[in-house]
Structures are given as C-alpha cells and as structure tokens.
C-alpha cells in the first residue's frame, strides 16, 4: 500500500489555488486543503498525512473527520518541516511505499535518496494543472501523482474529479 505525505505549508504557499486563498486567510486555505485531502482519502482508500508547521496557524481544534484516512501533523515552531517529513518517510518506508507531495527541491531529493517517491502535484485537485504548466522547465522530470498510481488509484482519482466537477457546477 502507498501512503502519501503532503508538505501542507508548501502547497498552501506555492500551489496557485491555495496561494490565492492563503493571501486572504491561511486558515481558510488550510481548511480547504484538508477538505480536499479528506475527499481524496475517501475516494482512493489511501492514507494521507499532511504536515504543517504550527507557527503559521493555530493547531487548536484542527483534526480530520472521524473515520478519515487523513492524518494531520503539526511540527513545532522550532522544527524544520522538511526534516520532519524526512523522518516520517524513514518511519513509513519500513511498512509501505511512500510518496511525498512538495515543490521543495531539496526535500524531493532527500525523499528520493531515502527510497521514497517525489510527487510534484495533485492532478486530481486541479484538472488543468498539467496543461497550465505546459513545457515549463521547472516542472520537467517530475512525476505527477496520477502517473505513479495503479489502475485502482487512477479510477479513484477519476471518481473524485467527477464529484468535484459536479459539486462545483452545483455551486454556480
């Protein structure tokens, strides 16, 4: 089984949809990321751990829904989030394949050295992300999460995309 670790602060600051939300409210952006990750765990059946540094947000009262396969970790203010994720990769690689979602190149290289897999984006959260990136050299050589999943995982992603589209249309 594959477990996915998400560098939550990195996604909030560097992924376009979340960075726009973060400018208005870090808490709203974080809650939206958690909501989307919970939806992914429900559809895919995969475990996901999202890691945040507590200096950016108050961790009081933040938790995944009951029965969710989403684990939310807050590292202490004085801890380096990259080192914390590396430690989690080392722990989890003893029992399963691990993928890490981050745009941090140093962390991505460390994950690869440890035997984990670097996942450069969440294709299932944004249908147009690959087309927006085009041939941008910053994203060359990275493996998208959809390209690293088995057929069961891909089917789960497609179901999630359809559900998100339907929900988005119903709000319009």
Image: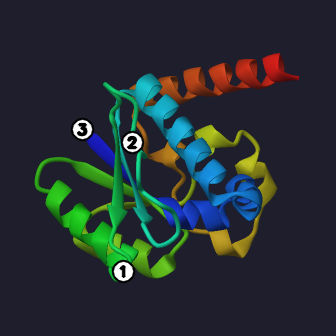
Q: Residue at x 42, y 32 (%)?
A: 41
- The CA distance from mark 2 to mark 3 is 23 Å
Residue 31: in sight, yes or no? yes
Q: Residue at x 30, y 45 (%)?
A: 3
Q: Secondary structure at mark 3?
A: loop
Q: Secondary structure at mark 2?
A: loop
Q: Which image quarter holds the C terminus?
A: top right
Q: Residue tagged by mark 1?
A: 80
Nearer to us: label 2 or label 3: 2
Q: Earlier in the sequence, mark 3 or mark 1?
A: 3
Q: Which image quarter holds the N terminus?
A: top left
Q: Residue at x 76, y 44 (%)?
A: 128
Question: Residue 54, percent across and down?
Answer: 42, 67
Q: Residue tagged by mark 2?
A: 63
Q: Between residue 91 and residue 133, name the one nearer to us.
A: 91
- The CA distance from mark 3 to mark 1 is 27 Å
Up the image or down, 147 lies above or below 111; here it is above
- Mark 2: few/some/many CA within 10 Å (<14, 14-19, 20+): some
Q: Between residue 155 and residue 88, name the one nearer to us.
A: 88
- The CA distance from mark 1 to mark 2 is 21 Å
- Residue 1's label in the rendered image is 3
Residue 154: in sight, yes or no? no
Quarter holding residue 93? bottom left
Q: Earlier in the sequence, mark 1 or mark 2?
A: 2
């Amino acid at each position: 089984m594959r477990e996915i670790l998400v560098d939550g602060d990195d996604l909030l600051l560097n992924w376009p949809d979340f960075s726009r939300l973060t400018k208005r409210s870090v808490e709203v952006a974080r809650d939206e990321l958690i909501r989307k990750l919970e939806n992914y765990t429900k559809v895919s059946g995969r475990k996901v751990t999202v890691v945040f540094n507590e200096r950016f947000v108050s961790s009081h009262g933040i938790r995944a829904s009951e029965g969710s396969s989403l684990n939310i970790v807050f590292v202490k203010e004085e801890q380096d989030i990259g080192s914390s994720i590396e430690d989690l990769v080392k722990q989890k690689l003893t029992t399963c394949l691990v993928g890490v979602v981050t745009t941090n190149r140093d962390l991505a290289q460390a994950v690869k050295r440890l035997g984990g897999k670097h996942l450069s984006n969440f294709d299932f959260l944004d249908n147009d992300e690959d087309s927006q990136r085009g041939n941008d050299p910053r994203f060359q050589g990275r493996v998208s999460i959809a390209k690293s999943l088995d057929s069961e995982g891909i089917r789960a992603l497609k179901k999630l995309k359809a559900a998100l589209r339907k929900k988005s249309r119903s709000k319009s």
